Image: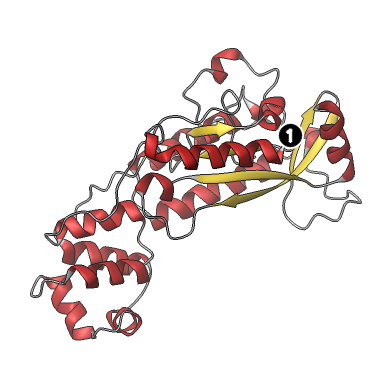
Amino acid sequence: MTTAAPATGTIKGKAKGNDTRGNATGVGPLLRCWRERRRLSQLELALRADSSARHISFIETGRSRPSEELVLRLADHLDVPVRERNSLLLAAGYAPRFRETPLEDPSMGMLREGLEQLLTGYEPYPALVVDAAYDVVAANRGIALLLEGLPERLLAPPLNAMRLTLHPEGLATKIRNLREWRGHLLHQMERQIALQRSDALRKVYEEVAAYPVRDPGVDAFEAGTDVPYFALPLRIEHEGHVLSFISSISTFNTPMDVTVAELAIETLLPADPATTKFLQTRMA
């Protein structure tokens, strides 16, 4: 599982954002930083954004000030996170375009209701919602089932999904293919850190990457299973059964709010008939 969860069905708090501080100042150096992160030349970016390499060069060196519309267009083609688009606008002398609305705000009522319905509707299979730093926003009863038996001190809020999953006294004690799943999660976080500036996410990564890893012994991933897995499964031992899941993560298309942009919904799809039968029976 990429993530873990708190008490089920509760959506609260504000999505934890990225720290946009860095050495670059001004819109030019910031845009150059994002262009280099995406490994694009000035000409390639100019062609995509209907501009010219000369104009991009002038912007990056501070010789030209981009229009608000061009800042947003460049940010779109550079796949800049919504939070960072506000930073680019501010650096260029414009007002932020995207709001950051707390989830508990009345205006987010429809979003909260929709997420709760989605999580409940996915039961008995596990599903949860996390923010940009993998802090858990909400989860369903399927997640709570997987966390049964873990120490109470690890389940006290606020919960961080990566921390609870990889902690040596957390869900890691139940994961049969821990080394493979741990490698997958750390690689996932490394990709995110490389694509966005987030001190909060880097701090979580450095913590969980330093956790000791037990010797899997005979509990290592059973590659010889007769189940034709189409993706790396998460194999969790629970109540004498080995449950297998395939993880899927969803985000919102074209978000107009920073909080919404930084939410992710993870669903765990049963990877074999035995897991489906156990969950349907256990949570009937």
From the viewer's side, name the closer residue of 238 and 276: 276
Asked if residue 88 is positioned above or below residue 234 in the image, the reply reads below
Residue at image coords 41%, 30%: 13
Front residue (pair 26, 98): 98
In this rendering, would 8 be left or right of 61?
right
The percent coordinates of residue 269 (x first, y second) are 74, 46
Residue 135 position within the rendered picture, expressed as x and y whole percent measured from the top left: 47, 34
Quadrant in which the N terminus appears? top right
Q: Residue at x 41, y 36 (%)?
A: 103
Kind of residue indicated by mark 1: Pro
Q: Is residue 18 left or right of residue 126?
A: left
Q: Quadrant of the C terminus?
A: top right
Residue 200: which quarter of the image? top left
Number of callouts:
1
Q: Farthest residue toward the right? A: 226
Secondary element under disc 1, as helix, strand or loop, is loop
Name the residue at the top extreme. 152
User: Which of these two is toward me, 160 or 142?
Assistant: 142
The way the protein has been coloured in the rendering is secondary structure
Residue 273, horizontal then vertical, whole percent: 89, 44
Q: Dot 1 corresponds to which residue? A: 216
Apparent side of residue 127 relative to residue 229 in the rendered image (left or right): left
Taking the spot 54% from the left edge, 50% from the top edge, the residue there is 187
Which residue is painted at 46% across and 24% down in the image? Answer: 158
Point out residue 159 in the picture as x, y percentages from the top left corner.
Answer: 50, 27
Q: Residue 121 vs residue 190: left or right?
A: right
Above or below, comparing residue 182 to residue 91 in the picture = above
Relative to 111, say whether 32 is above or below: below
Mark 1: few/some/many CA within 10 Å (<14, 14-19, 20+): some
